[in-house]
Amino acid sequence: MSDEDQFQALLGDDVKPIKIERRVVINKNAADEKTLAHRREKAESEEIKADDPLAGEPIEMVDPLAELSFRRPGVQHGVFRNLRQGKYAVDARLDLHKMNIERARREVYQFIKDCMQNDVRTALITHGKGETREQPALLKSCVAHWLPQMEEVLAFHSAQKQHGGVGATYILLRKSERQKQETRDKLLRADKKL
């Protein structure tokens, strides 16, 4: 005889479970399909925004022939001048031509993340000027708006003519943790030699 059978035998036949009335009535059909679809869409967009800081921000338009320029505090003048003059080797390139804004946003975000993972310090994004478009310089304006929002980006400037001129942008990225450690190790070895 199992424990459960013994328990039932002790209770007898006249013991019955207590009936409990529900205090809250749940209406399973309270939200219609349209409301559920809206909630689902909003939740998905919030997930994307939490992962990607570039999502959903209003963008200030720039002139198609305008020169883009940005430098965080702490970036040396000489370093920024060399970036502006195209003196650093371009280690990675991204071409945004023929992309819509949403795809370009995802590509820029992923490109910067990939550059950081691969120890790229200088990159080039080709966005075009969009002079013949209905909305000129749309991708260029987006790039000018997105890049300062990413902490990995130390500086950027419109490229030299041989790299696309005002239709492309040089980007200077922070050192990755691996690069910082290598620099510390080099300095430590140099101190020990002295």
Image: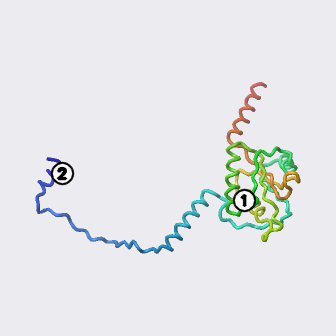
In the rendered structure, find residue 131 and report the number of the disc placed on it. none
Q: Picture coordinates of residue 103 (x, y %)? A: 68, 60
| Residue ranking furthest to the top | 193
In the rendered structure, find residue 146 and report the number of the disc placed on it. 1
Amino acid type, label 1? Trp
Residue that carries the numbered disc 2 in the rendered image:
4
Q: Picture coordinates of residue 151 (x, y %)? A: 70, 52
Toward which corner of the image does residue 143 lie, by quadrant? bottom right
| Colouring convention used in this rendered image of the protein | rainbow
Tell whether 157 sits left or right of 146. right
Residue at (75, 47) in percent of width and height: 92
**Viewer-closest of 165 and 176:** 165
Q: Picture coordinates of residue 177 (x, y %)? A: 68, 41
Amino acid type, label 2? Glu
Tell whether 183 sits left or right of 29. right
Callout 2: SS: helix
Label 1 Cα crowd, 10 Å radius (few <14 / some 14-19 / many 20+) = some
**Viewer-closest of 194 and 4:** 4
